[in-house]
Image: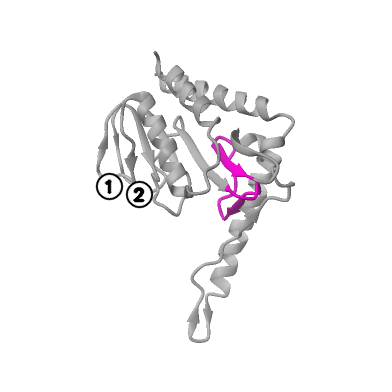
Amino acid sequence: MKIYGKLKAALNDIKHWEYADSETGDAFTQRISRRIGNAIGAAPRCGSPDIDEIIQKGITVFEQPYGTQLSPDIAIVILDTSLKIKNKTGWIPENSITIEVKRSATGKVLWNSGFPTQNRIYILNTKTKFNSGTTMVLGSDLVDEIHEQTVGEIRNELKELKKEKQNIGNFKLVHLRPMYSESAPKCYWLSHKDRKEREKRVIKHLRKQINIGRL
C-alpha cells in the first residue's frame, strides 16, 4: 500500500475518534502522531531536530517540530534528498504536511496567537451537550489571503508598538501578542453543512503534498 493510501486511512480513522473526558490535549496529539507513524511504519520524533543534524530522504513524522509553544503540532516531512538543519524554526519544507490539533469541551476553539494558515490541516476533537467527535478541515476553508494579510499587518503594528513602548519605568515589555477566538456558534465545525466536503478537501491536500514529494 502506497504512502498516500496509508496516510489517508490513518486520517479517516482519526476522524471517527470520540472525545474522551480523561484525555488531555497533549495526549490526544500524541495519539494522532503515533497513529500516523504506525501508518508509515516509523515512530514519530518528538521535538525539533538539532542544528546541523541531517534528516535523511524519505518520510518522517515530527511531533512538536518547533517546540511546544509554536505551530504546527505535527509535521509529516517528505524529502527527495537529505536535509541539513540550519535553524530551529522555519526548516520544514513547503511540501510537508503540517497538522495543528485543537481540542475543546465546548465546541469553540481558542486559537491563542496561532491564527489559521491556509495550507495547514486542523483536527478538532470536541464534546458538547449536542454532539461529540472529531473532524478535520484545511486552513483555506477557515481563512483567505485577505485574512492572512490583515493578521500580518497586526503583527507588524504590534512589533512597532513594542519598540516604542518597550521600557516602562523600571519595567520592560517582554511580550505583546494578539489572541484569537472564534465568533462562530459552538459545535460549528461538527455541524457545518459542508463538513464532509471539508474533510474530502483535506484528503485532496494530502494527495497533492505527497505528489509534490514523489512518494
The CA distance from mark 1 to mark 2 is: 7 Å
Q: Is residue 77 visible?
A: no
Q: Earlier in the sequence, mark 1 or mark 2?
A: 1
Boundaries of the magenta span: 104-127
Q: Is residue 43 above or below residue 204?
A: below
> How many discs mark residues in the rendered view?
2
Coloring applied to the structure:
one colour
Asked if the residue at tag 2 contacts the one at tag 1, i.e. Cβ–Cβ closer than 8 Å, the answer is: yes
Residue at horizontal 45 percent and vertical 19 percent from the top:
4
The residue tagged with tag 1: helix, strand or loop? Answer: loop
What residue did someone put label 2 on? 88
Going by the numbered disc 2, the residue's amino acid type is Lys
Residue located beneath label 1 in the image: 51
- Residue 38: within the magenta? no
Q: Quadrant of residue 130?
A: top right
**Picture residue at 62% right of the left edge, 61% below the top:** 157
Location of the N terminus by quadrant is: top left
- Using a 10 Å C-alpha cutoff, classify the residue at mark 1 as few (fewer than 14 neighbours), some (14 to 19) or many (20 or more): few
Q: Provide residue 7's location: percent of width, then percent of height.
A: 45, 24
At 49% across and 22% down in the image, what residue appears? Answer: 8
**Percent from the top left, x then y, of residue 84?**
28, 38
**Residue at the far top in the pictured view:** 1
Query: Looking at this view, is 93 or 163 the one in front?
Result: 93
How far across and down, in percent of the image, does residue 24 sit? 47, 50
Q: Residues within 10 Å of mark 2 (few under 14, many from 20)?
A: some
Q: Which element is circle 2 on? A: loop
The quadrant of the rendering that contains the C terminus is: top left
Residue 20's label in the rendered image is none
Residue 15 seen? yes
- The correct choice, above or below, for 175 with respect to 211 in the image is below
